[in-house]
Image (cartoon, rainbow, N blue to C red):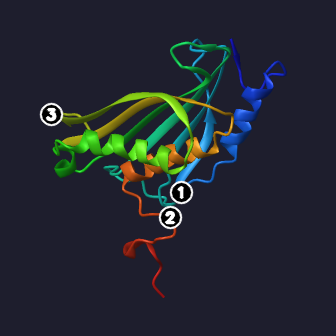
Amino acid sequence: MTTSGTAAEPAPFRAAIDAMHAAVVHPGIELGPMRPPQKLAPYSYAISAEVKHADTDVIPEQSEGDAFGRLILLYDPNGDDAWNGNLRLVAYIQADLEAALAGDPLLPEVAWSWLTEALESRSEPLNALGGTVTATSSVRYGDIAGPPSAHQLELRASWTATSEALAPHVEAFCDVLAYAAGLPPAGITELGQHNRT
C-alpha cells in the first residue's frame, strides 16, 4: 500500500494531488493534509477541512457551530469496475445544527442537493455519485459535560472523477461544508463580526 509522498507514485495520482492543493476555498475554511486510509486502494491521499474559529484565549464552555470534514482521494491505476474509473473521491462532513433545523424532514434532501448542485455548478463530469445524509439528535443525562442536547448533520458521499483536475471537486466539497456550517458567502461579513471604531 502506497500513500502520497513516495517516489513510486504514478504521474496521474501526483497530478491529482497537486490539483487538490490548487483549490481556492471559502476563507472561513482551513484545509490540511491528513493520514489517508491504508487499504481502500493502491494509492490514497486525504485532506481535512474545518471551519476556522475566531482567535481567542478563552475556551468556550459549549462549542456551537462546529463543522469539519475530510476528502479522500483513492487511485487505482488498473481502474475499478464499481468506480467506473480510477480516481475515486470519498467525502465526509459533520456539522452541528440548531434544533429547529435538525427536526426538518426535508433536511437530508436539502443537504444532498448542496452537494449535487456544488458539483454541477463547476461543470465537472463525474461518475457513480452516491451517499447518505443523516441528521441525529442526542440528549445528555447525569454528570456528562456539554450542552443538554445536540443536533448534527452527517453527509457521506463518494464519486469518480473523470480527470486529474480535482480542484473543482475540492472547492465543491468545501462549499458544502460552508453551507452546513452556516457560513456567510465569501466576501460577506456578518454584522457582529466586524470591528467598530
Alpha carbon of mark 3 to alpha carbon of mark 1: how far? 37 Å
User: Viewer-nearest of labels 3 and 1?
Assistant: 1
Decide: marks 3, 2 in contact (CB < 8 A)?
no
Q: Amino acid at mark 1?
A: His
Residue 179, position as x, y percentages in the image: 39, 52
Measured as percent of width and height from the top left, residue 86 is found at 63, 21
Question: Is 97 on the left or on the right of 120, as rendered?
Answer: left
In the current view of this chain or complex, which residue is farthest to the bottom? Answer: 197
Question: What residue did someone put label 2 on?
Answer: 186
Amino acid type, residue under disc 3 in the picture: Tyr
Q: Quadrant of the N terminus?
A: top right
Q: Which mark is residue 190?
A: none
Q: Is residue 173 left or right of residue 103?
A: right
| Residue 26: image tag | 1
Give x and y (percent) for residue 165.
Answer: 67, 39
Residue 141 image label = 3
| Apparent side of residue 99 relative to residue 62 in the rendered image (left or right) | left
Q: Quick one: 156 or 113, which is closer to the camera?
A: 113
Q: Nearer the viewer, residue 75 or 101?
A: 75
User: Please, is residue 28 above or below residue 171 in the view?
Assistant: below
Asked whether the viewer can see residue 53, the reply is: yes
State which tag comes first along the sequence, 3 or 2.
Answer: 3
- Looking at the image, tell me whether mark 3 or mark 1 is earlier in sequence order: 1
| In-image side of 102 versus 66 (left or right) | left
Looking at the image, do the residues carrying marks 1 and 2 touch, with CB atoms under 8 Å apart? yes
Estimate how packed mark 2 is, as few (under 14), some (14 to 19) or many (20 or more) residues with alpha carbons within 10 Å: few
The residues bearing labels 3 and 2 have C-alpha atoms spaced at a distance of 39 Å
Write down the quadrant of residue 27 in the picture: bottom right
